[in-house]
Image (tube, rainbow, N blue to C red):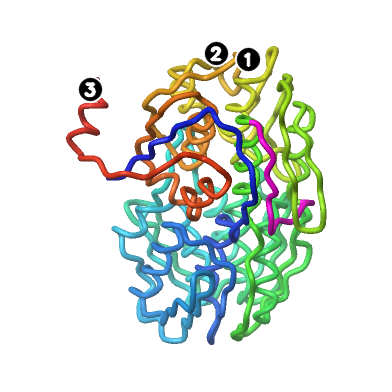
Amino acid sequence: MQKYIVRGGRPLYGEVRISGAKNAAVAIIPAALLVGGVCRIENVPQISDVTVLLKILRQIGANVRVLNTTDVEIDCTHINTTRVPQELAHKLRASYYLIGALLGRFGSAEVSMPGGCNFGGVRPIDQHVKGFAAMGADVREGDYIVARAKGGRMKGANIYLDVVSVGATMNIMMAAALADGVTVIENAAKEPHIVDLANFLNSMGANIKGAGTDTIRVFGVEALHGGTYAIIPDQIEAGTYMAAVAATGGDVLIRGIIPKHMDCITAKLQEMGVEVEEKDDTLRIRRDGELTRTNVKTLPYPGFPTDMQPQITTVLALARGTSIVTEGVWDNRYRYVGELTRMGAQIRVEGRTAIVEGVSHLTPATVQAYDLRAGAAMVVAALAATGTSEILNVQYIERGYEDIIGKLRSIGADIESVEYSEEEFIQRQIG
């Protein structure tokens, strides 16, 4: 088992380059199943979720070649089963995208219930199932989600999502790409990674219009062909480094981003007194004065992203005054708050709302990562706290952040990953 040791309390200076978007990659890689030919996917992040997805594709018959640190070739011409290995599917939430992709290409899918992060809220797939059923699939849920398209091919349908769901929007798009007829998704999510998935599929011969709006139309085609596509930069990774500079102080140039995607995060940091300078594909983040309070509510894009809520809450814990954070997407995403209070933060949670009373500093402690973004928040807190902190359960962090140790070191952080025993972990839990 690995843990991070962070010697915090020092400002960050230098440059950091952002990797490909995790939330796009974990959908685009399964979407390669729809393609009858070789896909070359570029700017793929080196994270554990990607590693697991590539293993799954190999196990069901795909030919996967890792070309270099960022590019892979995937050929799904000879898939030999539509049943996904349970032990691998359990390791990540994004395994549910395999259902839509397999249904779309083969009219059949058997995927065990997904795993990944559990941050205390309910993350149902009812909207996914609703969409598949509307398109003519029989879906049964149990230990495995078993889906079969009547007649062997999905049918176009009009689908209204009861809630704005990123996962359901993307999954239905994949199931519809090769369907017979036109599929209309209303109340669709509009996140950048949804547009990226649509662009990937269109570059392979799909006909998808309206991605990035609340109504998406998918005109089913007979087949998709191979091609080359580069994944967009990771909005949340960039936002996490922005939060780290805001919490510690310093001056960092973030390279390889799409500034428009960062507007919702940039605006809140500027309200708090952080300087953000935008140029082409870079953002320069500077903070040397006091942080001031603000209120944040997470919303579907273009609102403030729920995946940045733990990180911004950590920064607000160091801001002068009282801030209110409202979680507008998930029922509960505050499991990490107890870890922050161990470091001296003053945060009270009431339902979907956190009341954050700013403190002058955080104190080092041993804390746990309860999920991917909560783990990132623990890193931000440890960087800001003067002294040595330890972060356990870092496998969650490595699901979504490429080379976080190397990148933080490159901007002056004192952080390392070391091994520790399972017995030590159990003792920490008991203690």
Q: In the rendered structure, which disc, 1 or 3, sits on the residue that comes first in sequence?
A: 1
Within-10-Å neighbours for mark 3: few <14, some 14–19, many 20+: few
Q: Which mark is residue 358?
A: 1
Q: Which of the image's four quarters has the N terminus? A: top left
Query: Do the residues under discs 3 and 2 have CB atoms within 8 angstroms?
Result: no
On the question of residue 162 being in view, the answer is no
In what element is the residue under mark 2? strand
Q: Where are the magenta residues, as a range?
A: 249-260
Q: Is residue 380 left or right of residue 202?
A: left
Residue 430's disc number: 3
Q: CA distance from mark 1 to mark 3?
A: 30 Å
Expressed as whole percent of the image width and height from the top left, the position of residue 114 reads 40, 52
Residue 248's label in the rendered image is none
Percent across and percent down for residue 395 are 37, 46
The quarter of the displayed image where residue 312 is located: top right
> Is residue 140 rendered to the left or right of residue 244?
left
Please name the residue shown 69% across and 56% down the image: 255
